[in-house]
Amino acid sequence: MKKVLLATTALIAFGAVSANAAEPVKLAIGGYMIEDVGYATNGSGQAKSNVDVQSDVNVNFVGSSKLDNGITVGVEVDTFGSQRKDTRNVAYNGAAGNSDVKRSFLTASGGFGALIVGEREDALYIIHNSAPDVGDVGLQDGRWFQWVQTPANHRVYTATNTSRYDDRTQKISYVTPSFYGLAAGASYVPSTSLSSAGHASIVSNSDNANLTNTGSVNGTDFGGDVYGAGLTFNNTFGGVSVKADLGAAQANIVGLDVYQGGLQVGYAGFTFGGSILNRHVGSSATVDVGSLGRVTGQRLAKTAAYAGQSWDAGVAYATGPYAVSLGYFGDRSKDDGISGTMGNGGGADSTGVWTLSGAYTMGPGVAWHNSVSKVTYTDGAGGQTAANANKGYAVVTGLRVDF
């Protein structure tokens, strides 16, 4: 999914889908469609079927125009092409299903770099590198939690990048030109507030949701001004490719600090990679719904749920139309010194994912992907019940069509 996002962003940045300056911007249609069939095992007490069919469909509208002054102005709108409602995690995809628009943003690029304004992931996400994976289920930022059920009270965090702390809210990002492979990126997210629907909005009574299950953080926005910046490097030395990044961000709600780093090294068909994300919430913060009020309490509790660390490591090999990869993703979410009510029993929740994937390119834009994953959710407070812990395997096969 991220590969497609970066590819379409590159189209805009370099004017690959363009119009003359005297003409209006013409949009090209692209995107991808993934249809997976799989079998998953789960612990007792997890209510769902073992066999499932899942989709991931995006239809993208991309276009740009190069002005007489040399600046390329581009637009991208990414939409969901399916209902986005599955049997594994309705809370993540939304009870109402399709939310229509996934991303919508403008870019202005030239010799000065690229300016990105609108609803999309931040600059630290754009420059990030992580463990390679050739399957559909994925590792970091993957979809394994849609196959092996996330326990109701488990705080799951699926990424080693910053995409989860501000989601795709309105923001301003800038990426510098590359200098011998070295570039920098920065983002600013204006003040936003958490809504129960998982999208940035003005605080209202709709935010007064029940805090019993504050565990899941995927797809939610915690709110607050966010500042982030990082460095990225991409170059080749004697047949060895090196990609690396390092960045940090700070959010003005209970002092959430985020630090990320990633590395990929490629040689003779092999790619080795890994990444790490540290999420720290200051110990002076308190989470006390009773005294702080429902809205404020929810925002603090959700932000505290982000505290912890996630990481991944893996290797991939590709030759001709064939590719295979093996990797691990791990996360340890914790209270990080936050006092008060977390709503899930406190302690550190751990997630571990092993994934072996294979892919075969059947033709231009058509690939057959297969994955075998082992997923383990552990409750740090010791409550190994169905609401707090789970483990299982997922065997998934499917086709991906890029268009």
Image (cartoon, rainbow, N blue to C red):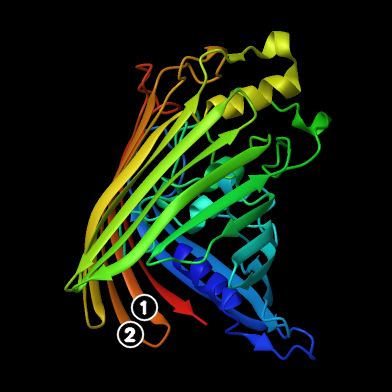
| Residue 184 placement (x, y as % from top left) | 49, 55
Whether 197 is drawn above or below 346: the answer is below
Nearest the camera: 118 or 230? 230
Q: Callout 1, which amino acid?
A: Ala
- Residue 135, visible in the rendered structure: no
Whether 10 is drawn above or below 99: the answer is below
Mark closer to the chain start, 1 or 2: 2
In this rendering, position of residue 167 left or right of residue 328: right
Residue annotated with mark 2: 362
Residue annotated with mark 1: 367
Nearest the camera: 121 or 97? 121
In this rendering, position of residue 347 left or right of residue 394: right
Residue at coordinates 58% horizontally, 80% vertically from top-left?
30
Whether 184 is drawn above or below 75: the answer is above
Q: How many labels does the image show?
A: 2
Q: Are marks 1 and 2 in contact (CB under 8 Å)?
A: yes
Q: In which quarter of the image is residue 296?
A: top right
Nearest the camera: 397 or 156? 156
Residue at coordinates 73% horizontally, 35% vertically from top-left?
193
Look at the numbered disc 2 and give the secondary structure of its residue: strand
State the CA–CA distance, disc 1 to disc 2.
5 Å
Q: How crowded is mark 1: few (under 14 residues within 10 Å), some or many (20 or more)?
A: some
Q: Residues within 10 Å of mark 2 (few under 14, many from 20)?
A: few
| Residue 178 placement (x, y as % from top left) | 46, 66
Q: Callout 2, which amino acid?
A: Met
Nearest the camera: 260 or 146? 260
| Residue 156 placement (x, y as % from top left) | 45, 36
| Residue 81 placement (x, y as % from top left) | 62, 69
- Residue 72, visible in the rendered structure: yes
Residue at coordinates 55% horizontally, 60% vertically from top-left?
175
